[in-house]
Amino acid sequence: MDFEPREVDVVDVHQLSRELRELFSSQGLAVLSTHERGQPYCNLVACASTEDLKKLVFATTRATRKYENIEGDPRVSMLIDNRSNEAADFHEAVAVTATGRAEEVPGDERDAYLALYLAKHPHLTDFVMSPTCALMKVCVDRYYVVSRFQHVMVLDMDA
């Protein structure tokens, strides 16, 4: 069986957007990838997405390696998937990689992004309200959606 991914054009942008919204609403965690002097570094983060899918939001303490890495180079990727750790994942799981740039949410935008984040993760209120915590947004350039381990669709957010 050939598992080499093949890129295909997005046929129905609206359908793919709906599927992304459904996936993001069902999943609380994502893998954030940053780098430090070229060395990849990954973390699990609780995340939320905006309705238009153009932004992903997560929180981190400013004294973390991920925050420092983003300060050094804001280019990041995030992986959100629906795997169940069962054999069926090879044919049924969907994994989405978002690429873009991360930055701390500026003060004038904080209330809106905070409400979005806490609507999904109310159990993290104390954490995100701490003065040492930074609310971060990823401005998404592109989504790579992989299903059945070889069906790849690309959604450019600039289009």
Image (cartoon, rainbow, N blue to C red):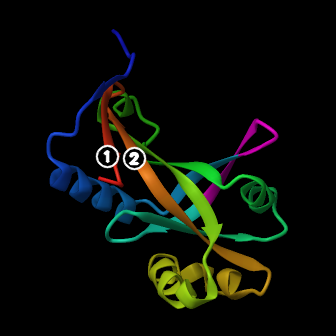
Q: Magenta region, mostly helix, strand or loop?
A: strand
Residue 62 covered by magenta stretch: no
Q: Residue furthest front?
A: 159
Report the number of discs.
Answer: 2
Q: 35 or 25, which is in the foreground? A: 35
The amino acid on which the numbered mark 2 sits, given as a three-letter code, is Tyr
Residue 156 against residue 124 in the figure, above or below = above
Q: At x 52% / y 52%, what residue is drawn?
A: 100
Q: Which residue is mark 2?
A: 143
Q: Residues within 10 Å of mark 2 (few under 14, many from 20)?
A: many
**Range of residues picked out in magenta:** 35-45
Q: Is residue 27 left or right of residue 13?
A: right
Q: At x 68% / y 52%, what residue is drawn?
A: 43
Asked if residue 12 can be seen in this view, the reply is yes
Q: At x 22% / y 39%, what residue is drawn?
A: 10
Looking at the rendered structure, the secondary structure element under dot 2 is strand
Residue 18: quadrant of the picture: bottom left
